[in-house]
Image (tube, coloured by chain):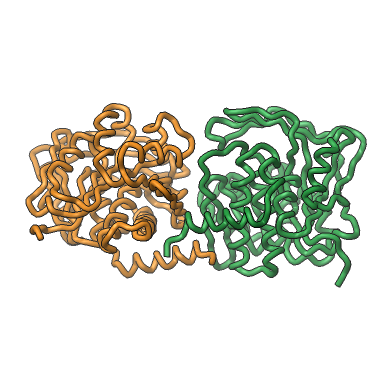
Chain colours: A green, B orange
Amino acid sequence: MPERTVDIVIVGSVGIDTVETPYARRESILGGSASYACMAASYFAPTGMVGVVGADFPEAYRKLYADAGINLDGLRTVPGDTFRWEGKYEANMDNRSTLAIALNVFEDFKPELPAGYVNAPYIFLGNISPQLQMHVLDQVKSPEFVLADTMDLWIQTAPDDLKKLISRVDMLTLNESEARALTGGRYSLIRAGRDLLELGPKYVMIKKGEHGSLLITRDNLFVLPAFPLERVVDPTGAGDTFAGAFLGALARFGGISEKNLRRAMRCGAVVASIGIEAFSLDALRHLTLAEIEKRVSQFRAYTAID
Amino acid sequence: MPERTVDIVIVGSVGIDTVETPYARRESILGGSASYACMAASYFAPTGMVGVVGADFPEAYRKLYADAGINLDGLRTVPGDTFRWEGKYEANMDNRSTLAIALNVFEDFKPELPAGYVNAPYIFLGNISPQLQMHVLDQVKSPEFVLADTMDLWIQTAPDDLKKLISRVDMLTLNESEARALTGGRYSLIRAGRDLLELGPKYVMIKKGEHGSLLITRDNLFVLPAFPLERVVDPTGAGDTFAGAFLGALARFGGISEKNLRRAMRCGAVVASIGIEAFSLDALRHLTLAEIEKRVSQFRAYTAID
């Protein structure tokens, strides 16, 4: 068996966010898709982060990752400033607008995998350009399961590269509007999902935020509500948290079966629901697997019928 | 045991609709909350309709009810025209606008229950004014379970009567925006539901359309996704179909338990999903309980994890 330091490799952004909700505002908090996804995945299996930060990246944030056991061999530090994002949520927490964005060191990001990562079986290609996602994919040896996320920007600016990438992954995950945009305006998410399967992946997982998620496979469907929450503090990173916990759970369960995919999605929904109860990684960083399992049981109770 | 001709009494509107979707338009089709709810309930238990139609009400529509076994002792025919509604759906089938409405004979509607209805154990007070809903409630002897629906109009124009009504029912059902409007703009549906429980009912059932439904009880929650559909033809009446099938299933299962409420909601979601696959009652009128059970099994397969 080839040597490896992690079971899960996650590539994505690492950033410093300023987030405003109708109830509060937090400046310069830790964010980025890789931050959320790695933190969520790390509860389930050894996880390595591939990303880039600037010289200004606070040591406290790096320690936060390390304390969670996230392998940082793939996190490069380069001269310059860390990626920054500022966003504001509307009253329903559903719509948000980007107030400011500065790519900084992320602009020249070219993800290179450390030797201990290339044999990892589970890969999450977080939301970066499809070219870079493919560059990561070119480096991994024989992954068992590759999950890719994307966003509107790449659907609009790099549709051909994106389709090439999609043809090479096991699962594509995206949100409702992205699924529709990528399929020319399909209103039915199931049809959009089936169209996307035609591009090559075995699975399409559509994230619907507070309305749950949907798994479309070649011969089946799975619908999962969101974990019901009384109060959402900060929805930033929920999709990445979902994806990270999903992939982590899949790695932990071992083996890709319909049942494991469904159980892993439930873990994704549960960990995402915990994450959005606080700003940044505040609620995610001190979790235990036992606490996650407790909420899984609660979720089961909230959805059980027979 | 007092004599009765039906187990379920449903009061609501009976109307002639003109419906336009992005794909088709149908003129003068059968509609109204009582039509949808009675048709859905009638598959589960003997159901009586309380409503009013004008002299212009087509005999074919009356026969359609009768063929489904709906008891029409409570359906009055009076001089004048039947209630008419015209609506148009936007591309996503989520938003609709009312293009025209003519209350006609519905304006002077005062629901009177036939002798065979007053001992019915299951009552659905469909969406009419809270005063009239209370007038129906005053006539029933000792119902086991009273379900009430409402709408924005009554929340705005008759909030005090509505709250009085709510205090007298077992379950209130309403959609997301109504739940928020009735609780002064609560964004959390769970909190809105808990606020509504304070008004007196034991249960609040929130309908979220394609996003499923939510049951809030004093000490529990239940979340149910919608049955996943590839194609929606006409969403008109989905909420009433849900409520009718829910109440019908509850009557059929016998006894109000958390488990029966959940199973009944699944029946509601399933029958509603069938209903919106065609205009008017076209998909609902030729159903069998076996077909409903088949889709319930399918739904179970689409949601099962453990």
Horizontally, residue A92 falls left or right of residue B169, namely right
Residue at 90% over, 41% down:
A77
Horizontally, residue B67 falls left or right of residue A282, namely left
Horizontally, residue B257 falls left or right of residue B299, namely left
Residue situated in front as seen by the camera: B164 or A15: B164
Q: Residue A135 placed where, x, y %?
A: 83, 53
Look at the image and tell me whether residue B185 can be seen: yes
Query: In this picture, is A24 found above or below A220?
Result: above
Q: Residue B118 placed where, x, y %?
A: 12, 50
Q: Residue B99 placed where, x, y %?
A: 33, 34
Residue situated in front as seen by the camera: B192 or A204: B192
Quadrant of image for the N terminus of chain A: bottom right
Residue at 36% over, 67% down:
B293
The residue most toward the right is: A79
Residue at 51% over, 47% down:
A228
> Where is residue B20, by image quadrant?
top left
Horizontally, residue A292 falls left or right of residue A220, namely right
Query: In this picture, is A118 found above or below B173?
Result: below
Look at the image and tell me whether residue B28 can be seen: no
Quadrant of image for the C terminus of chain A: bottom left
